Amino acid sequence: MRVVLLGSGRGSNAEAILQAQQEGRLGRARVVQLFSDRPDAGILALGPRFGVPAAFVDPAPFKTKLEGEGEARFIAAVGGCAPDLVVLAGFMRVLKPGFLGAFAGKIINLHPSLLPSFPGLDAIGQAWRRGVKITGCTVHHVTADVDGGPIIDQTAVRFDAGMTLEQLTEKVHAAEHALLPAVLASLAG
């Protein structure tokens, strides 16, 4: 199963996937390319480290969504890899119908909450401010409904009394780093 990873930030989830791949824990899944919408994103530095091609794709003209010329560039770049699966690993853009249609049924996302609770931005902060006792992370299929696609798997994280936002964030990220590679291995069969 050919996997393409998209990310916008430091790439900790992509690193967990690549580490699992290196250790033989992804089954038949194989990351063939990393792409980022930010030229300075940490995810791009993972490519040379793990022997996987990594490239910036210009997302312009929009800042928070993938549409227009930027969307066309991403469709061409990702499509050129012939992916079986496109994984959004911290990709901070809303996908629009063109991209969704080009890779229909092949896009999954990792979200830092137990969806349907706390969709959208700052999910861990939302959960922390709300004072929930259990939060976690979700891997789901991507649809036009932001963070609303069918759920593939979830991991719960207990919110202990007195825990800081930073501590909760660490616990959720640790759960993400275990869940996403496990889901990839499961999907690859």
Image (cartoon, rainbow, N blue to C red):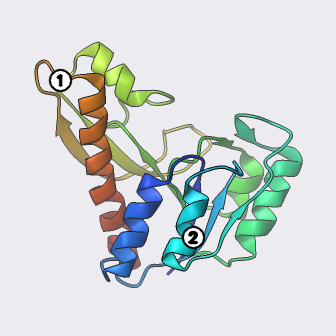
Residue annotated with mark 1: 163
Indicate the quadrant where residue 61 lies: top right
- Vertical placement of 132 versus 51: above or below? above
Indicate the quadrant where residue 180 lies: bottom left
Q: Position of residue 19 (x, y in %)?
A: 37, 71
State the CA–CA distance, disc 1 to disc 2. Answer: 35 Å
Categorize mark 1 by other alpha carbons within 10 Å: few (<14), some (14-19), many (20+).
few
Q: Position of residue 2 (x, y in %)?
A: 55, 79
**Does residue 180 appear in this view?**
yes
- Vertical placement of 173 versus 21: above or below? above
* Residue at left offset 49%, top offset 81%: 1
Residue closest to the eye, 165 or 136: 165
- Vertical placement of 173 versus 27: above or below? above
Element type where label 1 sits in the image: loop
Element type where label 2 sits in the image: helix
Instruction: Report the disc number at residue 47.
Output: 2
Label 1–label 2 contact, CB within 8 A: no
Q: Quadrant of the C terminus?
A: bottom left
Amino acid type, callout 1: Met
Instruction: Report the disc number at residue 114.
Output: none
Residue closest to the eye, 11 or 68: 11
* Residue at left offset 27%, top offset 49%: 174
Amino acid type, callout 2: Gly
Categorize mark 2 by other alpha carbons within 10 Å: few (<14), some (14-19), many (20+).
many
**Does residue 85 appear in this view?**
no
* Residue at left offset 49%, top offset 39%: 147
Q: Earlier in the sequence, mark 1 or mark 2?
A: 2
Residue closest to the eye, 166 or 61: 166
Q: Is residue 63 left or right of residue 9?
A: right
